[in-house]
Every structure is written in C-alpha cells, then in structure tokens.
Amino acid sequence: MSPSKNFFSCHLSPDKTRKSHLDYERKFFLADSLEKAGVISSVRANFLRGSSLHSQNKRAASEVYYKRALDVEELDDKDVIFYSRSARTLAQMLSVKNDYETTIRIAMPAVEKLEGNERAQSRDLAVLYYTIGSCQMYLGHDADAAQSYENAYWHYRNSITKKDTNGSRIRSAITGVSNITVAHLNTKHYKEGKKWNDRTDSLLYVYRLRPDADTDFIDRNRARIRLFHACISYDAGNKAEAEAAFNAYQETDYSKTEQGQLDGNDYLMLAHRYVEAAKNFRTLDHWIGLRGMKLTLDNINLYLVPKYRAVAGAGLKDSAIYVANQICNAYDSALVWSKRDDTAEMATIYETHKKEEELARTQWKVEKQGHELNRQRLIALGIGFVLLSGFLAFYVVYKRRSFKLLQDAYSQLEEATTARERIESELRIARDIQMSMIPAGNLESEGLDLFASMTPAKEVGGDLYDYFLEKNNLYFAIGDVSGKGVPASLFMAQVIRLFRAMAKHHYPPAEICNRINDELTENNDNGMFITMFIGLVDLTTGRLDFCNAGHNPPVLGGDADGGNFIQMNPNAPIGLWQGLEYEGEFIESIKGKPLFIYTDGLNEAENPQLVRFGDEHMLEVLRETKFSNSMQIVEKLKRQVEEHRAGADPNDDLTMMCLKVG
C-alpha cells in the first residue's frame, strides 16, 4: 500500500518552459547578489538557491544548498521560517530516496532547534516529525516512531487551532495523519494503523462542519478511510467487516476514478481478488500516459510489478507475458534515465563552490556502502548458520514434544473458554453499570412529557442522554462519543458527571459546553471527543436556550405543523481543542411542539446493502405519525430502524429523546 502520488505535469510550450527556467535562474543569482550586499542572511539565501534548483528538478544540487541553510549554530528569529522550510523539504527529499538514516540525522537537530520557538510553524514541525517517524518505522524502530508520530499529531492539532480562513490547515492535518496510517499499513502494523485511521476520520468529521468544506476533498479522504479500514479489518480476520468497508469505499465518487480504481487494488490484492484487480489495472497504461509519468525504477516497482502479480494471480497468461515484457523494457530505459539523470545532477553539483567537498562526501559514501555491504554479508552468513543449526535441533526434539503440545493445546482451549466467559460476564456487568448511570427513560411532570431511549451497538457504548428538572427549569442533553465499546463508555461516564455538576450550578448551555470542553481537553492524548446538544427549557414560558456542539440538528414540530430541522450554529465537538468559546442560541417558545433529538445511530443506520436510514426517511416518519405522547414517537422510530436494518447488526449506538412542553 502506498499513498497516492501526484504526477501531474504542466504541459507548457517550449517558450513558456524556457521562460520559467530563466525565472528560476534569475532567482538563484538574485539570492547571490542580495547575500553579498548584506540584504538577506545566508540561511535565506541558501533556501532561495535550494528552492530555485529544486524547481528546475536539479535535486542533488538543491540538497547541497538546503544543507547549507541548516548549517547554523544559532538560529536568528528572522530566519526561522526559511530554516524550517529548508529542513522540511530536505527531509522529504531524502526520505523519498529511502535514505532513512540521513533523513533522521538531518531532521532531528532541526526539530530540536525549532521546538519551542514561537516563530516556528506547527505545520512544518508536524511534517518533520511525520517524516522522522516514517523513517524510524521503516528502520524497525517502532517505539521511537510511535513517539515521533504523536509529536506530529500534536503539532497538526495545534496548527488547526489557529485562524484557518480557507481550511488549508485542517486539510493539511487530515492529509498528514492519513499518511501516517499509510506508513503503518506499508510496514504491516495494521493494529496501530487503525488508531491513526480513526484519528483521520475524526479530523475529517470536524472539517465537514465548515461551510466552505471542499466536497471533493471530503469524498476522497472518506474513500481512503474506508479503504484503509477494509485492509485493517481483513488483516485482523474480520472478513465480513472488511467486505462491508470495501463496499462502502466503492460507493464514493473517488473510487470510480482511475486513481480510485488503482487505489482499490490495495485491498483486492490483499484479499486475493486478482481477477477484479487485473480488471482495474487495465487503466494503468492510460493513467501513466495521461500524466506523462517517467517509469523510473521506483515507479516500476510501485505500479507495474503489482499489475504483473494481479494478472498472474488471475491466470491471465497472455497478459502476464505482456506485462513482464513491459517491465523488462521499462527497466532498461529506467537504468539509462537513472544514469543520465545522475550525470546531469553531478554536473550541477560540480558548479557549486564546494566541488571538492562533495567529491569527498561521495567517495566516503561509496566506501561506507562497501563496508556496510561486507558487514551485511557476514551477518547473513552468520544468520544462515544459526538458522540451519536451529532447524536441526528443532527436528530432533520435535517428535518428543508433539504429544506434550497436544496436551498443552487442550489445556489452553479450556483456559481460553473460561477467559472468554469471564470477559463476557464482566461486559454484562459493565453494561448494567452504564445503563444505571442514565436516568429513567420516562419523565412526566405538569406541562411536560419526556421520553428517552439508549441502545448500545455493543455490550457497552458511547452514546448518552441525561436531564435535570428543578422547579420549572428542565436541563437536558444528548451526546455521541467518538468510537464505541469500553473506551467510549468511560468517556461517556465522565461527560454525564460533568453535565450534571454544571446543570446544578444553573449555567446556561453554552457555558456548560465551555466548561466540559476545558475539562475533557486536558490530558486527552487519545483525541476522543463528543458531539452534544444541550438545552434548557423554561416550562412556564416555553423558551428554549440551547447550544449545539457538532451534533445532528434536532427536529421541532410533528404531524400537525410539519416537523423540520432547527437551523443553528454547529460549533465544534467537545474535547478537541482547549479554550473554544461555544455560541448559544434560543427559541422564544416551543410550547405545543414536540422536540425530537437523536444520535446518528438513527439516520445512519444501515441495512445489509449498506443503505442508510437517512434524514428524509426520519422526517417522513415524524410528519406522518400522529403525536400521542413522546414514548410513542421514540418507539415508532426504533421499530422503523429495526425494519430498515433487516437483520444487519447495528453499526452504531442509537439514542433518541422526545419532549413536549404544554
């Protein structure tokens, strides 16, 4: 699995191409002149030189100047941005070449200089930490990689707390965290990859709330999340869940594009669905030609080799022979291009002021590679000898241990059965405890009819509802915690405790959101959050004060007056960022109109074909059901959801509340 690469090239006329190169050359010499005149620092000048050469695809020469930009003892405040961009670009260039040790050796001192500097950009630090983490991951340093990725995630989240006028910061964060997922899947760390895929999903959820959200960006990243979920589930042995996730991926617009079909092969190849993968690979040649892509050694391995494996696995012998010939021809051309490009790059390097230094470094690198190769050969011989000895020893004792292993297996089966029964018993107890934390589903008082219901998708869940009645004031809340299971239930318990405490202090709904958010964001390392709708009703006047924190809009009204969604400010979910100020709103009176609040386990409930219940279906039921009491509305919708599921397991917790004043 590999992240999608953008190979789009600008098809400029020769005159325009020549003009752009002249502009970059002027930029290079202008940097020289300004540095000599003392107008700009050496850090900025070397950054400009490096970016100029980089834009002309003179990668090796640009590396020289980026390295010079980083070669400073003390970092002046005015140079921070040029230093961080040089470090970020250089680290990415080196990691693409799979030079992981050099990447870490250059990037680590850079983050040490930038960390804590007020002028340093969080986005640059996030990319640096992500690049370091990926190199550590590919080198097998999993614990170090995990810490680097957490640092990257912290900086991504920090960057989107600042003013983000066009959404570029959160889009960058979504892309970065998604690429962390890719690194985990590339290295077969599927279990850890699930956490990062969930985090990407959480960030995308927040981005979707923006009025200027890019629908194509949302669709593309939703597709990637579902595709990664399919691969993760398949590796975990959850074949049915994997198929459902891949089917959901295929419902996206992105999956129907050429790029989307090629990405979908990541799952099809993993699931050994070679015939379908081979069909998708038919568009590969057109896709490569459309982008004017050069078939380098890396691209041959990334695209043509998987295509060969697909057609061979599908038993398409003629196609396999054709692709094999294509690989051979492309390989010969790639070697020629590689040598020619290397020669051109070296010629540019020789033009720099440190020609002798570069030659010395190149020679040292060759010698180091030679020593490393010899060392690896010796290690390989040693490992081979140890493996052979181990195999012989194993064969000798194998028969003696067979009977004992059979006995041990039987004992382990008994222990596993006992452990499973104990876990199931503990989960049942946890469910009972959780259900005891929420109030009774029915509340009837003078001038008030309220009914609520909560149905977890698993033994324990992350939905909640709560209410608090004091004299003529009714506080109520409904919420949906990110995720499911035990972690979500613990988070839910904390939210209920905080809501009740704030309601008893008679804070308005927006202030309750502010205070709960401040409590939950402290030490929230797992990035969990909750969407909530909190309301306060004056039973005498019918006035409703409310605050919506990223939750589904409630429906006001019913069969008599045609129920509709309440138009309101969405705000952000609670628990993501500290210091947010939530905006409250009010409706002068809701007397005589039923108010229906719910979690997305209702409108997003899916049947076996993954078709959702939907907002329009929900409104249709509410408008067509003659209101008798709140319990009747909730139970009616619960039955409708069960009929829609048609035997499919619940895909989310389902919580509903209906109330009517007067």
Image: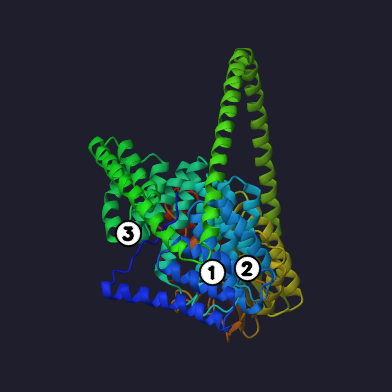
Q: Residues within 10 Å of mark 3 (few under 14, many from 20)?
A: few
- Type of the residue with mark 1: Val
Name which residue lies at 45% across and 65% down: 351
User: Residue 601 vs residue 406: left or right?
Assistant: left
Cβ–Cβ below 8 Å for labels 1 and 2? yes
Q: How many numbered callouts?
A: 3
- Residue 484 location, quadrant: bottom right
- Of 359 and 335, nearer the camera is 359
- Distance from the alpha carbon under mark 3 to that under mark 2: 33 Å
Q: Residues within 10 Å of mark 1 (few under 14, many from 20)?
A: some
Q: Which residue is mark 2?
A: 576
Cβ–Cβ below 8 Å for labels 3 and 2? no
Q: Which residue is mark 1?
A: 206
Where does the image place residue 552, in percent across and percent down from the top left?
A: 52, 70
Query: Taking the image as drawn, is residue 15 in sight?
Result: yes
Query: Taking the image as drawn, is residue 457 in sight?
Result: no
Name which residue lies at 42% across and 57% down: 4
User: Residue 572 vs residue 490: left or right?
Assistant: left
Q: Is residue 111 above or below residue 141?
A: below
Where does the image place residue 173, in percent across and percent down from the top left?
A: 54, 66
